[in-house]
Amino acid sequence: MVEADKLAEYIAILDQSVERLERFSLSALQITEFKAGNRVVHKMNLKVKSHIEKSVTRLKNKIHKKRLHVLYNLNDDISINADPELFENCIYEIIDNAIDHSPENGKIVINIYSTEPDKVTIETLDSGEGFEQKILNNPFKFFVKSDRFIGKNIGFDLAYVKLIIDAHSGNIELSNTTEGGACVRLILDQGTILNP
């Protein structure tokens, strides 16, 4: 007879696998739509903070399991001109990767600030080992294999995020921090200032 704790653990693993498969299917569908030129981007004025918090909330169990600290440095009023679904998918993928590559008790820092006229920068930094050089050399190629994380196709997530950012006429930059973690920087068009 399977113990209750073991059964709960198996169910949690199955739930996680189903969610991962659903996300992969949705991402694959959207990538196909982008590549075929069939994906319409419905831009609107979005408060950045609320969409980032929504993604963090969706990932709270994973964050809690690794005992990670998520820190925000942001202005509540900053907004962007973006498609809500695509922007949230993009942020979710970036934070999910940051969680995967951060050590237990590590931290993830999310900085949001206005840059140059009419631009917003969203920066996500983790406390992991940073990007491998081969990822930095060819960051947005689909299915680039990681030497450190066997079975992880880092390039799929980054390539998907790049398609979303390109559809918004934005920029994405990857680098390693001086402390050794990874930094993903998104630069998007600023929206109109929104009142809470």
Image: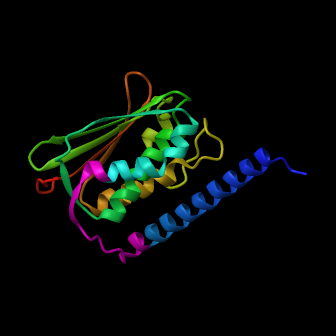
- Residue in the foreground of this view, choosing between 137 and 23: 23
User: Measured from the top left, where is residue 9 in percent x and y?
Assistant: 72, 47
Work out whether residue 98 can be spotted.
yes
The residue located at (58%, 60%) in the rendering is 19
Q: Is residue 152 left or right of residue 80?
A: right
Region rendered in magenta: 33-50
The residue located at (27%, 48%) in the rendering is 49
Q: Is residue 16 left or right of residue 108?
A: right
Farthest left residue? 117
The residue located at (46%, 52%) in the rendering is 58
- Residue in the foreground of this view, choosing between 166 and 4: 4
Compared to residue 63, the image places residue 92 above or below, namely below
Indicate the quadrant where residue 164 lies.
bottom left
The residue located at (65%, 47%) in the rendering is 151
User: Measured from the top left, where is residue 148 in percent x and y?
Assistant: 60, 35
Compared to residue 176, the image places residue 6 above or below, namely below
Compared to residue 43, the image places residue 120 above or below, namely above
User: How many numbered marks does the figure carry?
Assistant: 0
Farthest front residue? 4
